[in-house]
Image: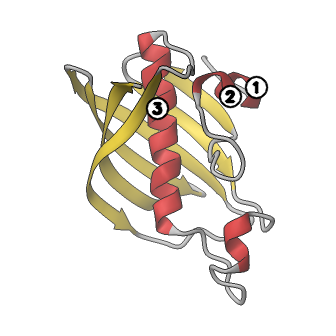
Amino acid sequence: MNTMNIHDILKYLPHRYPILLVDRVLSYELGKDIVALKNVSINEPFFSGHFPHHPVMPGVLIVEALAQAAAILTMKTENVVNNDNMIYYFVGIDGVRFKKPVMAGDQLILKVTIERQIKGLWKYSARAEVDEQLVTEATLMCAARTL
């Protein structure tokens, strides 16, 4: 089974604290899918304002975590490491649904599958789960761009 620790992840993603949202890759199959993990700690900077009396992870950050998992899969599939000459951008998010809130202390499991790739445009189906229950799902589209 293919896995990645945080040191491996940092080789592929340009993101750093506080926006790095993937802690570990539990499994991946090149050109197919990835399962990654985000530990949601009460120490996350967004919890001080969202919401202090009821700490909920913002939905846009759950979608961002899914996109980061997708980027890792794409870069591994393309055999490209993080560099200053290329970046993967979001170009579309469709059908996003938030089913349950993600709370401090949760382990967010990020599951992303490549649906298709055409001329540098990648389309993925993505879902996030906590305790094997769906919390968010979406269709993501990303594109590689040379800087």
- Percent across and percent down for residue 100 are 48, 72
* Residue position marked by numbered label 2 in the rendering: 10
**Could you tell me if the residues under marks 3 and 2 are in contact, i.e. CB atoms within 8 Å?**
no
| Kind of element beneath mark 2 | helix
Would you place residue 53 above or below residue 139 in this image? Answer: below
Q: Distance between the residues labelled 3 and 1?
A: 16 Å
Amino acid carrying mark 3 in the image: Ala
Would you place residue 138 above or below residue 120 in this image? Answer: below
Q: How many labels does the image show?
A: 3
If the image is split into quadrants, where does the C terminus sit? top left
Task: Specify which label sits upstream in the sequence, 3 or 2.
Answer: 2
Would you place residue 31 above or below residue 98 in this image? Answer: above
Residue 133 in view: no
* Residue position marked by numbered label 1 in the rendering: 7
Instruction: From the viewer's perspective, tell me whether residue 9 is left or right of residue 136.
Output: right
Camera-nearest residue between 68 and 15: 15
* Residue position marked by numbered label 3 in the rendering: 71
Identify the image's colour scheme: rainbow, by chain, secondary structure or one colour: secondary structure
Q: In which quarter of the image is residue 114?
A: top left
